[in-house]
Amino acid sequence: MMNIPKIPLGEWINVLVDWITITFANLFILLTNSIEGLLDAIVAILSVGSPIVLIIVLALLVAYTSGWKLGFFSVVSLLLIDNLGYWESSIQTLSIVLVSGLLTILVGIPVGIWCAQQKTVNRIVTPILDFMQTMPAFVYLIPSILFFGIGVVPGIIASFIFAIAPTIRMTNLGIDEVPKDLIEAADAFGSGKSQKLFKIQLPLAMPTIMAGVNQSIMLALSMVVTASLVGAPGLGADVYRAVSQIDVGRGFEAGLSIVFIAIILDRISQNLRNPTYKHIIKPKVVFSILALLIAGTSIVLAIPLGDDASAIQDENSIGAAVGYKIIGIEPGAGIMEQARTTVKEYGLDQWNLIEGSSAAMTTELKKAYNAQKPIIVTGWSPHWKFSSFDLKFLEDPKGTFGGAEDIHTLVRKGLKEDAPGAYTILDQFSWEPKDLEDVMAYITGGMSAEEAAQKWIKENPDRVAEWVDGAQKANGESIDLALVAWDTEIASTNVIGKVLDQNGYDVSLTQVEVGPMYAGISNGSSDAMVGAWLPSTHIEYYNAYKEDLMDLGPNLRGTKNGLVVPQYMEIDSIEDLQK
Ligand code: PBE
């Protein structure tokens, strides 16, 4: 066993995904644009008029399908959502779920029918569905980002893959369960295949199929938080932001809104087939009214678009070229708060700051750069991206990104007494931007973070000697370092971790979101962190927790945050985005 080299499964998958990304690039662009267009249309339709319009329509629909009590509940819960300030997020979430649901129906029911008709197809599809449902949904996000960029589309696609199985399975099952004698009777009367399908099998299978659709919709809703990791907006993003900033109250509010939406969607989709008040008003009438409402709103919405004179001028602006998107990172990052302030201070009302992750941001940047397309990201230096790509910071005349800063080392209270050696090393840890950049370059070159740290330590014995000078050796005591998965912090934390390890400590690294990193040091569940960007980037976290931790001062000086674009773009200042 020991002699078999590791099968490069991961590398094969990477090669395959690279190939798909390049070969089907145009298809992905087409899909992205269509899905985004559909979503925008749904959001626009749902947001027509004041919230009360939609609240009434939804509540009436719930009442009609599931009884007046639930209708009343819907009114109250939706009013509460609006009151708490989650209305827009809820519309986003509702629209995302509707689009995923629509896709599941469009693809799932035909595939289910096919499975029911051809046993071979069924034999192939079933294990694929098993696989799709068991593979952690997070994993789908990775190729989704590569194919569809960050934003709402990869989230919808990942939800779709995760949610489609029940629709396929239940359609298959429903058709399968149609009594054989009915089919034989139909055969005897000489009906064709499609006649049998549409007149007998589908109508009889409908309750089962709808149960599958209902499950799919609920699964899609359960994906909203996951989807927000790649930039999907809505209630999921509110929850993610609350986790990232440890805001219990907001997390609860957003979570509660998700629960309300879940109940409403569940009841409507469950009872659509068999509405409570179908004896009073025929379903056909209700659906016709709904269809008319939707069609009417769409037409009204479509008219003013035509005579917008400024639209032509807009076509050529930077904003239009990048879809008014600024690609951000983790919602709790300090730079995101600065970017939000920037959007406000420079009056960039039309612009969207997309939340996601640092890794997703660099992936987007790489993709745009290789295609020489315009892109705007939140960026910081030191960072490897500046040596890999030709980039520039946009000038920031209003100073909303806070100017040059330092990175501090913070440790928990009591570390000095408990682990004096570690304390000394952490206290003496200090290096230059160039050092940090070297480590990052090794990592982007393909080394693991640990290997990169090891290599840098070997190459810089003098520096390391200064850090460990006079530090007491340890005997396997454990030390925990907290970090966020930013490239800078991955590099620095691994280096200092290795040094501590070489001095006899049993080192563990704990990767968390920003808020939890600070909270972890202040409540002593982690020992230290080396990524506190001060005085401005992390000022809010610092102020919230500074009483309960120790600041050992800067370990690196001269960082910078801002909006970053490729050199080939013809803008120089954040002010240029106002045009
Ligand atoms: N960063 C890197 C972090 C600090 C380290 C600039 C992305 C932030 O914005 O919080």
Image: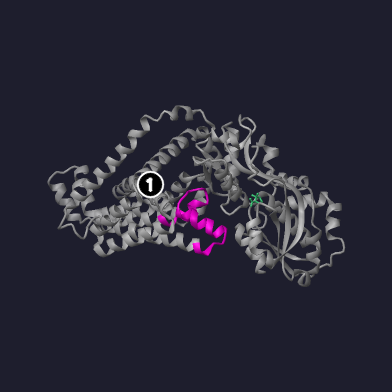
Instruction: Examine the rendering and report whether any part of residue 189 can be seen.
Output: yes
Colour basis: one colour
Q: Residue at x 47, y 37 (%)?
A: 28
- Secondary structure predominantly adopted by residues drawn in magenta: helix
- Decide which of 241, 228 is in the foreground and name it: 241
In the rendering, at what x and y percent does residue 90 appear? Answer: 41, 53
Mark 1 beta carbon near ligand 1 (under 8 Å): no
Tell me if 368 is positioned left or right of 497 in this view: left
Crowd around label 1: few <14 · some 14–19 · many ≥20 (10 Å): many
> Which of the image's four quarters has the N terminus?
bottom right
In the rendering, at what x and y percent does residue 484 appear? Answer: 64, 55
Q: Residue at x 43, y 38 (%)?
A: 31
In the rendering, at what x and y percent does residue 129 appear? Answer: 41, 53
The boundaries of the magenta stretch are: 221-249
- Pointer 1 residue: 99
> Which of the image's four quarters has the C terminus?
top right
Quarter of the image holding residue 532? bottom right
Does 69 appear in magenta?
no
Task: Establish if 403 lies above or below 73.
Answer: above
Does 224 appear in magenta?
yes
